[in-house]
Image (cartoon, rainbow, N blue to C red):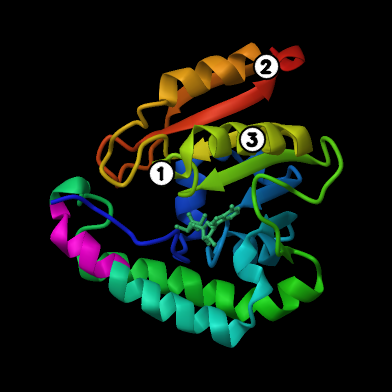
Amino acid sequence: MTFILKSVVPWGRSFDEYVAMFNLSADDLKRSIIGCGDGPAGFNARMHEQGHYVVSCDPLYMYSSNQIEQAILAARDEVMQQVKNNMQNFVWKTIRTPDELEQVRMSAMQEFCKDYKAGLFQGRYIPATLPALPFRNRHFDLCLCSHLLFLYSSLGLTFHLQSIHEMARVSEEVRIFPVVDTNGQRAEYFDELMDRVRASGLVVRIEPTRYDFLKNGHEMLRITHARQK
Ligand SMILES: C[S@@+](CC[C@H](N)C(=O)[O-])C[C@H]1O[C@@H](n2cnc3c(N)ncnc32)[C@H](O)[C@@H]1O
């Protein structure tokens, strides 16, 4: 069976998962960070609570908290059904069962929901849609993009290329996780995409992380500007 989600769903990971997925060090957490496609993840809420600075961008933030809570409940049913139908696509080690997965995710999303209104007011949640971000060049130190690019490979080569260039425009460094789709496969255009990103002068590295849940999906892409080499 193949893991298929009908659309890019609002489904959020926790602070601890972000730290593991992106190999975030204590120094990284002190940098100014933009999260692209952060959706209902708990990362921004926890970072804010710890006194750090994250701006999350997602088209989801056009909606009210009630609408987002409804969308999360609908996504929960779809995602959990797909997970149960495709148990072999995941490494059941840190997260041991689908029930534990649901609990971890729902608790991260509750953290987001509690923080959402205040975060919108403070400009920490900004409705914005890749491949266009409303920030000046190099406004941020670090851009994180989790479970959007590559996971939804059907978004296509052009969208990926434009999004990577836009994230690199607004940030000194970009990290993207994972680099495979929901079935643990690299997009057929992956090599061409990497060639084109490198040809534009950016430096691209694929690095292992200690986050190992989606099979073949424990690596992240780190993109920097050539002068940082
Ligand atoms: C699967 S969720 C991942 C959420 C979070 N990054 C995480 O890993 O927990 C994907 C998110 O991407 C957002 N999204 C979809 N298309 C987008 C776009 N073009 N630009 C920015 N975000 C987008 C969706 O609204 C959704 O919140």
Which of 112 and 79 lies nearest the eye of the viewer?
79
Mark 3 vs 1, N-terminal side: 1
Q: Which residues are magenta?
A: 79-87
Q: Are marks 2 and 3 in contact (CB under 8 Å)?
A: no
Q: Is residue 154 magenta?
A: no
The quadrant where residue 168 appears: top right
Is label 1 or label 2 in front? Answer: 1
Work out which residue is located at the far right of the displayed protein and give it: 136
Q: Which residue is mark 2?
A: 200
Residue 224 in the image: state x and y as whole percent. Answer: 66, 23
Q: Quick one: label 1 or label 2, which is nearer the N terminus?
A: 1
- Find disc 1 in the rendering and name its residue: 154
Residue 20 at x, y percent in the picture: 45, 44
Residue reaching furthest to the bottom? 66
Q: Are marks 1 and 2 in contact (CB under 8 Å)?
A: no
Kindly tell me whether residue 94 is visible in this rendering: yes
Name the amino acid type tagged 1.
Answer: Ser
Identify the image quadrant of residue 43.
Answer: bottom right
